[in-house]
Amino acid sequence: MSSDDFHPGLGARSKHPDLVSRAEGLGRDLSAIEERLSKLETRYDELRMVNLALWGLLKESLKATDADLIDRILKLEAACAKRGGRYVREPRTCAACSRAVPEEKPTCMYCGAALQRATPFQGT
Ligand SMILES: [Zn+2]
């Protein structure tokens, strides 16, 4: 009986260093993904709380109803569904060079001109 038989993990490491290295790399990738997911979940919870607070304020100050909000959501979802089910921002035109640039860019990627904020949600 060799030492590899007694400690199969160590045997695998010496016999298949490429596989072990790849598995370690995948483990690091998984850890990074889990960390990013955790941050996104925290951010989601924070944004959900902000939305609930804002909706509460709007209901009180504008006398809006849940039906009003649901109507808005359905209209937005319908608009998004027309673009493959995702909200895709319309590109805008650079005032300096007239080229189409993505909505979220602060400067034109062609000529470098500063772009005016297109919407309150720019960059979100
Ligand atoms: Zn430009």
Image (cartoon, grey):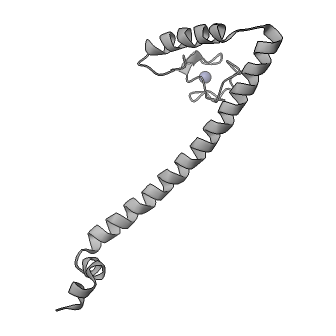
Q: Position of residue 112 (x, y in %)?
A: 64, 30
In the figure, residue 53 lies in which quadrant? Answer: top right
Q: Nearer the viewer, residue 87 or 92?
A: 87
Q: Residue at x 59, y 22 (%)?
A: 103
If the image is split into quadrants, where does the C terminus sit? top right
Q: Provide residue 108's location: percent of width, then percent of height.
A: 61, 27
Residue 94 place in picture, x, y as percent: 62, 18
Report the image quarter containing ligand 1. Answer: top right
Q: Nearer the viewer, residue 113 or 115?
A: 115
Q: Name the image quarter holding the N terminus.
A: bottom left
Taking 65 as reference, is 18 left or right?
A: left
Q: Quadrant of residue 20?
A: bottom left
Residue 102 sits in quarter: top right
Front-most of 68 and 101?
68
**In the displayed structure, would residue 45 be above or below residue 82?**
below
The tally of labels here is 0
Q: Is residue 4 above or below residue 93?
A: below
Left/right of residue 53 with respect to residue 20 in the rendered view:
right
Residue at x 51%, y 20% (from the top left corner): 87
Which residue is pictured at 30% across the width and 82% down the height? 10
Task: Return the x and y of residue 59 as percentages of the image width and height.
Answer: 76, 14
107 over 80 or under it: above or below:
below
Q: Residue furthest left?
A: 1
Q: Residue furthest right?
A: 61
Residue at position x 34%, y 69% in the image? 21
